[in-house]
Image: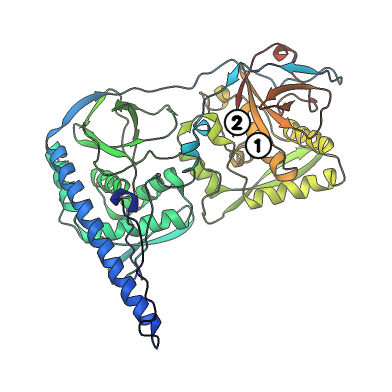
């Protein structure tokens, strides 16, 4: 049995200022009981105010769902793809020349928006919570979530599956589910798991999909439950339908590629498919008005790994004429496989797993232990250039596909941007220097900021020199650049 239930209260939506009454010297002989009594009364008033506020919003939203629906055309974006070397390039010189590479511009990313920086790795800005725990005797069910067994209450519901989907059917689901204490209890447990496991926006969607699949056989009900949970958790989500299928639609904070979307109120809503669903290519019918409560876009940026149960596998590589096993977390790699294809800046911040770092340290620490920072950088460059086999995304996948650092260890091949993501994490782990991505036409390399100037190719960015470090260019040391890019005007990605 689950042993607790908490209510997440969106304080900013209520515009409340929390001031606990002072107890003073009342009942000095038993101040804890008196404080608990005052706190319980305070909690009751907050919960009542929030319930009233939420009930009004839900009533307004229900009326929207009965009326304001229309058909939206779906679109899909693909990543820009430039020709890449079929064979990994090799330098034909050991000389290093000082060349200033003038960046064309800094590539726009979500990191430019300081307001959004405040909510990275967290909930929408309006979300704050007070946890109120209660005992519950609800029956529970367990499901596997990337190696962890998750226990949640089984919601009791009168909802019936419907063959003929309509806006009225969806509106009636919302009306019944949004006031169903059993369903809301289950959602609260899932919200608790999202926070405690550091899942972030996409991890929460994966959790909802896993939970709803366990709770319901009907895919449409799985979608409706997940939609309700996202709205209750402060995320901007909709549902739409086409013929007999209901689809989850989520507003995300960065562009997503290869995924259908429509635009409404200057926002893009991306279709999130559940198991068994086929992508709808043309159009969907959905409601025009937004949920009246405060909701925010689903954030895809994260810099802290989700807390999955580790499951370690190894890949054998050859480096310096010796074979070695590199470890990676297959649960983490499997999670990354589900991640939406998005802008390159998203892939740099997440660190390698502890097991992966340890296996690389066991291999490289003896080689760099007493070296200078430049010597360490050149060893790490040499490692990525030679130990990670090269293959273009087009040949390996048939489309442009970015990797998180852990995936580059997991997969048999990687191209230039994947190697650059991995190198940035190795520089951070072994040396701790600031890095940026340098985006040339059809190529990506790393820029590394040093404490002093050296000979070599560099870009000037925010009054610092970032020296070119190319993990694809075999034999290239820090400051060396492929000849075809010496006069290029690259873009910069800061992460």
Q: In the figure, residue 347 lies in which quadrant?
A: top right
Q: Depth check: 103 or 463 in front?
A: 463
**Circle 2 Cα neighbour tier, 10 Å, few/some/many (<14 / 14–19 / ≥20):** some
Query: In the structure shown, which secondary structural element does the residue marked by tag 1 occupy?
Result: helix
**Residue to which mark 2 is pinned:** 494
Figure label count: 2
Q: Depth check: 331 or 419 in front?
A: 419
**Circle 1 Cα neighbour tier, 10 Å, few/some/many (<14 / 14–19 / ≥20):** many
Name the mark nearer the viewer: 2 or 1.
2
Q: Is residue 27 left or right of residue 336?
A: left
Please provide percent x and percent y for residue 25: 39, 81
Please provide percent x and percent y for residue 373: 81, 38
Task: Please give the name of the residue rendered at 71% of the width and 12% of the height, measured from the top-left corner.
Answer: 484
As displayed, is residue 303 above or below residue 398?
below
Please provide percent x and percent y for residue 95: 87, 19
Spatial CA distance of label 2 from label 1 is: 15 Å
Query: In the structure shown, which secondary structural element does the residue marked by tag 2 occupy?
Result: loop
Q: Is residue 164 visible?
A: no
Q: Is residue 162 left or right of residue 481?
A: left
Q: Quarter holding the C terminus? A: top right
Q: Is residue 394 visible?
A: yes
Please provide percent x and percent y for residue 225: 27, 49
As displayed, is residue 471 above or below residue 99?
below
As displayed, is residue 276 above or below residue 32?
above
Query: Is tag 2's residue or tag 1's residue first in the polypeptide sequence?
Result: 1
As displayed, is residue 298 above or below residue 129?
above
**Residue to which mark 1 is pinned:** 422
Q: In the figure, residue 286 lies in which quadrant?
A: top left
Q: Is residue 240 left or right of residue 10?
A: left
């Amino acid at each position: 049995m689950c042993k607790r239930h908490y209510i997440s209260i969106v304080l900013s939506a209520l515009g409340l200022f929390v001031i606990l009454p002072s107890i003073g010297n009342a009942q000095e002989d038993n101040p804890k009981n008196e404080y608990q009594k005052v706190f319980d009364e305070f909690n009751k008033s907050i919960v009542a105010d929030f319930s009233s506020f939420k009930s009004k919003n839900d009533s307004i939203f229900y009326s929207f769902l009965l009326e304001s629906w229309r058909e939206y055309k779906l679109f899909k974006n693909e990543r820009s793809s430039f020709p890449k070397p079929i064979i990994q390039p090799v330098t034909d010189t050991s000389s290093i020349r000082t060349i200033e590479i003038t960046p064309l511009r800094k590539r726009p990313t979500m990191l430019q928006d300081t307001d959004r920086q405040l909510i990275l790795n967290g909930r929408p800005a309006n979300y704050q919570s007070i946890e109120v725990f209660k005992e519950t005797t609800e029956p529970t069910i367990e499901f596997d979530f990337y190696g962890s067994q998750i226990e949640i209450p089984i919601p009791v519901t009168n909802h019936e599956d419907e063959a003929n989907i309509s806006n009225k059917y969806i509106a009636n689901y919302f009306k019944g589910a949004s006031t169903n204490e059993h369903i809301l209890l289950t959602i609260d447990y899932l919200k608790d798991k999202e926070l405690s496991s550091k899942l972030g926006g996409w991890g929460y969607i994966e959790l909802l999909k896993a939970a709803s699949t366990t709770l319901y056989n009907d895919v449409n009900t799985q979608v409706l439950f997940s939609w309700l949970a996202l709205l209750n958790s402060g995320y901007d989500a909709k549902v739409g339908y086409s013929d007999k299928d209901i689809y989850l639609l989520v507003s995300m904070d960065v562009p997503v590629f290869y995924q259908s979307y429509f635009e409404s109120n200057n926002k893009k809503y991306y279709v999130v498919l559940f198991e068994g669903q086929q992508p709808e290519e043309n159009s969907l019918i959905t409601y025009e008005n937004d949920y009246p409560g405060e909701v925010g876009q689903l954030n895809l940026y994260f810099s802290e790994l989700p807390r999955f149960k580790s499951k370690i596998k190894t890949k054998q590589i050859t480096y310096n004429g010796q074979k070695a096993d590199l470890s990676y977390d297959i649960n983490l790699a499997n999670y990354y496989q589900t991640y939406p294809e998005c802008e390159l800046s998203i892939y740099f911040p997440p660190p390698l797993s502890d097991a992966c770092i340890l296996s690389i340290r066991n291999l490289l620490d003896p080689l760099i232990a007493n070296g200078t920072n430049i010597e360490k950088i050149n060893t790490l460059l040499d490692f990525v250039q030679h130990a990670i086999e090269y293959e273009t995304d087009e040949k390996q996948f048939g489309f442009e596909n970015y990797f998180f650092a852990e995936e580059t260890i997991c997969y048999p091949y990687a191209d230039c941007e994947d190697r650059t993501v991995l190198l940035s994490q190795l520089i951070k782990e072994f040396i701790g220097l600031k890095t940026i991505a340098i985006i040339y036409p059809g190529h990506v390399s790393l820029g590394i900021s040093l404490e002093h100037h050296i000979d070599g190719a560099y870009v000037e960015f925010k009054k610092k020199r970032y020296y070119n470090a190319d993990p694809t260019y075999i034999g290239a040391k820090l400051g060396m650049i492929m000849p075809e890019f010496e006069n290029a005007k690259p873009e910069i990605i800061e992460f």
